[in-house]
Image: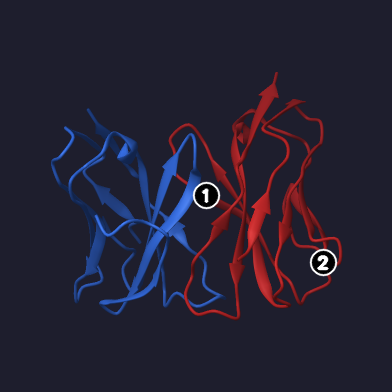
Amino acid sequence: KAGVTQTPRYLIKTRGQQVTLSCSPISGHRSVSWYQQTPGQGLQFLFEYFSETQRNKGNFPGRFSGRQFSNSRSEMNVSTLELGDSALYLCASSFKGSSTDTQYFGPGTRLTVL
Amino acid sequence: AQTVTQSQPEMSVQEAETVTLSCTYDTSESDYYLFWYKQPPSRQMILVIRQEAYKQQNATENRFSVNFQKAAKSFSLKISDSQLGDAAMYFCAYRSVETSGSRLTFGEGTQLTVNP
């Protein structure tokens, strides 16, 4: 079974631009979570989607948004990029996002904002 | 809100020796899961071991075992017979059972170096 895939792997943008990151979960998984990893703030939860509905949201500004498609693939969008948005963005999938599920992480997308 | 604290930013161990990584957490919930994830230089997060709070028996996975002290809110990871491939950043994480979803709260991480 293929693992979680994220595209692109690397991205360079300038301040003020917007960006869309994609995550394809493991086949059969319906829950997708997104995390931001920075040296200063560590790993922080962004949001979780299950069956095309946002189920949980972390403490991030409205510039960060996401969605999930009927095939469980998920995208996250960041508008009006700021320098502080430079980070590794990790996606994780699980079967149904229950507390007993194991989450599997993708390799991440490294976003650099200049 | 739950918090997870890893007080050791860096640790080192000699190959074949044993090392213990510390983690404490704060929660008012009685049922939850605790995890240790490994993040090698490739940045891919890999689940090492997990512990269910209502199970008193400490989890083990081959060379990896935990010491779970629920009353003390402590969850340490012991790596036995350390191997060069164990070198990575290790994260302790918490997941609630009482709230829906699979949200993980991570600690700051411990960078483990394995010396040959």
Q: What colour-coding does the image apply?
A: by chain
Tell me the CA gap for discs 1 and 2: 24 Å
On the picture, is A87 further left or further right than B38?
Answer: left
Residue A13, visible in the rendered structure:
yes
Tint of chain A = blue
Residue B11: image quadrant is: top right
The letter of the red chain is B
Q: Quadrant of residue B7?
A: top right
Q: Residue sitting at 66 percent across and 72 percent down?
A: B32
Chain letter belonging to callout 1: B
According to the picture, the residue beneath numbered tag 2 turns out to be: B70
Name the spot of residue A38 as percent of width and height, x first. 44, 38
A101 vs A93, left or right, is right
Q: Chain of mark 2?
A: B
> Which quarter shows the C terminus of chain B?
top right
Residues marked 1 and 2 touching at CB (< 8 Å) = no
Q: Amino acid at mark 2?
A: Lys
**With respect to residue A6, does A17 lie above or below?**
above
Q: Secondary structure at mark 2?
A: loop
Residue A4 image point, x, y percent: 34, 56
In the image, what residue type sits under mark 1?
Ile
Is residue A93 placed above or below A30 in the rendered structure? above
